[in-house]
Image (cartoon, rainbow, N blue to C red):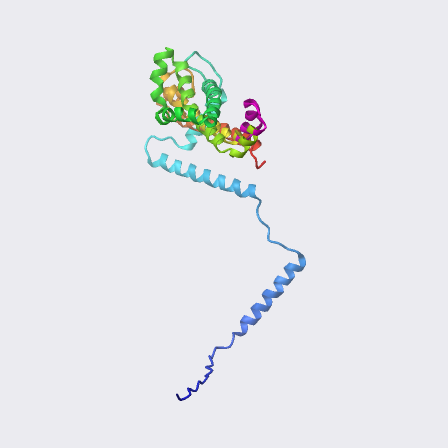
Amino acid sequence: MPAIALRKEIVSIKTSPPHPAAAILGAKADAAKARLEATGYRRAQAPEWLLTGLAWLTGLAAFVGAWALIAKFGGRVPDPLAVGAAAAKIFADPFYSKGPNDQGIGWNVLSSLRRVGIGFGAAALVGIPLGFMIGRWKFLAGMAAPIIALLKPVSPLAWLPIGLLVLKRADPAAIWVIFICSLWPMIVNTAVGVRQIPQDYLNVARVLNLSEWKVFTRILFPAVLPYMITGVRLSIGVAWLVIVAAEMLTGGVGIGFWVWDEWNNLKVEHIIIAIFTIGMVGLLLEQALVLLARRFSYAA
């Protein structure tokens, strides 16, 4: 077989020479970088709180601007200036009292908070221990599963007629609605937290022959506390949402009744003020529980 001669060919690629300005600019950039490094200069960055505050202010400004446009072209919606003027008059004397059905917004908010506190507290006293028991014993969890699955999706206001029928009065009926709607998040989250405890912990407790009380105080409660606080946060949000709707139907003194009464008087500015007041109170309740959750979190 004839030998095959392999020949290498080097193909030269012709490129254009670099522009003279490129070398000058590169030298200037290197010199500037060297000067910055020599002086220890670093580009200043805005602090995190400043960026967060700027984002908040930008969002609020966009919201107020959109509201002003809607008020201008949307008919009877009052503009921010009108609502601000009405708010100044309302909050100048928020705790006036001219009879059982004519009280300041402060008394109405306090009445709603009282109902929420009673219903929410009763739900915590029942729901948290029940969640521990459901998470601890499988047979009890099997018994409770269909009941919770059936009743948990029920609308809060569907429970109001049952409360009126049994309790005969509007105020206890509203508290009953708060209780029954705050119950489920506490039960579910507490039970889930108990189930997340490693089985090895419980096996060690069984080997050490610990009593059920010591198992609860030394193992269950510390491990379940973050889940339990999450359930409490969810429940307080649900409770504050529900009380407004329940008070619209039951009447009396409360922020929900105040909203409905102002609607009957066609004072839309007062309704918007009540909306912001409800949101602010809910935000404060949520932030208080967030701080509590951070206090007891494992990351802390």
Residue appearing at x 51%, y 77% in the figure: 17
Magenta run includes residue 210: yes
- Residue 203: tell me if it is visible: yes
Q: Residue furthest left?
A: 75
Q: Residue 15, percent across and down?
A: 48, 77
Q: Is residue 43 above or below residue 183?
A: below
In the visual, does 187 lie left or right of 27? left
Which of the 4 image quarters holds residue 241?
top left
Toward the viewer: 247 or 219? 219
* Residue furthest right in the image: 38
Q: Residue at x 54, y 71 (%)?
A: 22
Q: Nearer the viewer, residue 178 or 271?
A: 178
Q: Which residues are magenta?
A: 207-223
Give the quadrant of the N terminus.
bottom left
Q: How many marks?
A: 0
Determine which quarter of the picture holds residue 112: top left
Percent position of residue 106, x then y: 48, 20
Is 24 colored magenta in this rendering? no
